[in-house]
Image (cartoon, rainbow, N blue to C red):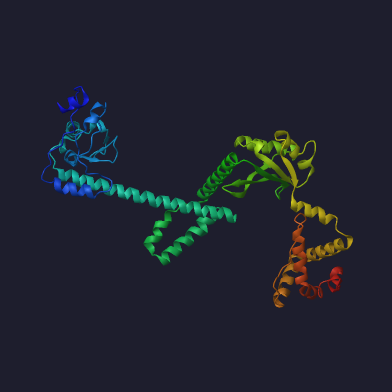
Amino acid sequence: MDLWLKTGSLKRCEKPAVQVDAQSEIVNVTVLVENDNNFSSKSSTPAPASDCNKRAVKHKYDVGYLGLGFTWTGSEDYPTLCVVCQKILKNSSLVPSKLKRHLETHHSHLANKSISFFATKLVGIKAMQRIIHSTTTFNDKLLEVSYLVSQRIAIASEANTIAEKLINPSILDAVKILLGESESKKLESIPLSNNTVSRRIDHMGINIKYEVCSRLQKCDLFCLQIDESTDVAGLAVLLAFVRYAYEGDIQEDLFMCKTLPTYTTGEEIFRTLDSFMSENEITWGKCMDVCTDGAKSMTGSVKGVVTWIKQKNSECSGSHCAIHRYQLVAKEMPSELTRVLDDVVKIVNFIKSRPLKSRFFSIICEDMGSLHCNLLLHTAVPWLSRGKVFVRVFELREELLAFFKEGKLSLSCRLHEST
């Protein structure tokens, strides 16, 4: 009558879930369930009058349902779990009649069991869940260790077999001595085989590529630095580095490394770059500058890479690599400096190109207590390295004089000159 006075109409309201009469053991079970973090001991309460208009009523779990073999899962949509067969039922099945029907239909031999029996089943389920959780957590840690070791192998450019042959045995020996035999056996299952390490490195490379490409897709502008060179195996390798702004800081990463199968012309280099950018959905409109070594295939006005890029983005500019500029400066040095440079290079090559003479020179340096035991080879492109070659020769001038007392070289007299 009160409901009709409040709403103005009398509508049928579904009855709340009926509670099951608890047996004598329900006190102990209630304590057990209340102490469990993943299960609730909330009892069902009648639905308020405002919920009567809803089409579906959300039933609530009652601790007495454990007497029918069901416990709470923590979910409102699938709240009940059978402690016998681990079957999960929907919220619509959370009524005593349906729970009892499940027990009598699927587990008829347990229909007359007391609530303590199902409480014991519940304890077993929770113990198994804890074992599975601890095992899964430990396996995740082993997987993390495998990736970290593979990352260090990749950074050090070591062979993939070093993990299985050296790193893993060393870890086991260290843990066995420091923590004991039982702890070392836990680490024997770290996946560090040759194929596994190779696969880990590939996965990390794919992840880095995805991260860099995602950043370039989101950033406003970026710059490229590209260079093509032939390695010792005769392969034409195209390297590209990218510089961009990310989270308020300037980042520089390796953009791509591809081999050119045939020609190394500007058109072929641009085709390789454009294909890579198209695959990763990066637009040329964000490229504001391209830095090259000044080669004709890079800066040619007709078929150079920069020319092809400007056809995609007219606002993109081209710049010359500073390191290669130093090389151009070195080609135009005064004749006096060029003569000194050539003489120093010949002296260094006379010793470094002969392993026997290099060993003798190292012995002389050790006997004289020198800071260095070897000379440095110069490189043609990084012009600043030539300064280091000059400094090393000057620091070892006394050792070179002692060495050339026994060896014959026409340029050894240059070491006596003061200017």
Residue found at x 83% / y 72%: 415
Q: Nearer the viewer, residue 156 or 390?
A: 390
Which residue does the image show at 18% across and 24% down from the upper left?
A: 4
Quadrant in the picture for residue 52: top left
Image quadrant containing the C terminus:
bottom right
The x, y position of residue 131, in whole percent, is 31, 50
Front-most of 150 and 96? 96
Identified at 33% across, 48% down, the residue is 132
Q: Position of residue 372 (x, y in %)?
A: 70, 70
Q: In the picture, residue 299 is in which quadrant?
A: top right
Instruction: Report which quarter residue 271 is drawn in.
Output: top right
Question: Is residue 345 among what the camera can see?
Answer: yes
The residue closer to the viewer here, 231 or 286, is 286
How many numbered discs? Answer: 0
Judge from the rendering whether residue 285 lies leftward or rightward of residue 64; answer left or right.
Answer: right
Q: Residue furthest top?
A: 9
Q: Name the outermost residue toward the right.
A: 335
Q: Nearer the viewer, residue 162 or 114?
A: 114
Residue 295 coordinates in the image, percent (x, y) = 78, 45
Residue beneath the point at 63% across and 37% down:
277
Using the image, determine if residue 253 lies above or below residue 367. Answer: above
Q: What is the x, y in percent for residue 38?
A: 28, 46
377 is higher (above) or lower (below) than 47: below
Q: Seen from this angle, which residue lies furthest left?
A: 24
Query: Where 257 sits versus 314, above or below?
Result: below
Q: Is residue 366 left or right of residue 213?
A: right
Residue 235 visible (yes or no):
no
Give the quadrant of the N terminus: top left
